[in-house]
Image (spheres, rainbow, N blue to C red):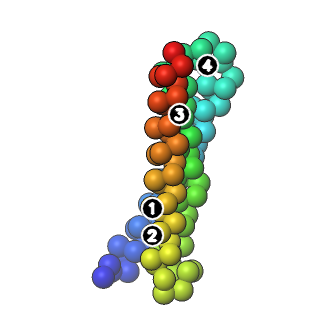
Amino acid sequence: MLSNDQLVLKHVTLPILAVLMTLGNGALILITLLHKRLRNSVTNLFVASLALSDLMTGVVVVPLVVNAEKGYFGSSQYACLAVFCLTAAQVRTLGLINKSVNQSTV
């Protein structure tokens, strides 16, 4: 069991991490969308796809984990863990599908 100081540190660090993930990956996606020259490269589109998956992790998954540890889901932390695993697997799978489709069309 974590001490109170460790829990406070965790509940401060994770939201900061989520904000940084959202800002950094959002900026990368925005730059890719705004500059046509960056959209012409399959590699840049793949990087933007990975940034989108990390953005979704920062927006959806990290807040769910923080809320589960605070006890907002009752005593069922397994529900949040299931949502986390499914979201991460889905996002990564979609990124890999995107990569394979891009490679097969080039």
Which is closer to the viewer, label 1 or label 3? 3
The residue lying at 57 percent from left, 80 percent from top is 72
Callout 1 touching callout 3 (CB < 8 Å): no
Residue that extends furthest to the right in the rendered view of this protein: 34
Q: Position of residue 11 (x, y in %)?
A: 47, 68
Q: Looking at the image, which is closer to me, 23 or 34? A: 34
How packed mark 4 is, by other alpha carbons closer than 10 Å (few <14, some 14-19, many 20 or more), is some
Q: Is residue 66 visible?
A: no
Residue that extends furthest to the front in the rendered view of this protein: 104
Q: Looking at the image, which is closer to me, 64 or 45? A: 45
How packed mark 2 is, by other alpha carbons closer than 10 Å (few <14, some 14-19, many 20 or more), is some
C-alpha separation, residue under disc 2 versus residue under disc 4:
35 Å
Which residue is the site of mark 3?
Answer: 98
Q: Earlier in the sequence, mark 2 or mark 3?
A: 2
Which residue is the site of mark 1?
Answer: 85
C-alpha separation, residue under disc 1 versus residue under disc 3:
20 Å
Amino acid type, callout 4: Arg
Q: Looking at the image, which is closer to me, 54 or 43? A: 43
Callout 2 touching callout 1 (CB < 8 Å): yes
Amino acid type, callout 3: Asn
Question: Circle 3 — which element?
Answer: helix
Which residue is the site of mark 4?
Answer: 39
C-alpha separation, residue under disc 2 versus residue under disc 3:
26 Å
Q: Earlier in the sequence, mark 1 or mark 4?
A: 4
C-alpha separation, residue under disc 2 versus residue under disc 1:
6 Å
Amino acid type, callout 1: Cys
Q: Position of residue 15 (x, y in %)?
A: 52, 60
Tell me the number on the disc at residue 81: 2
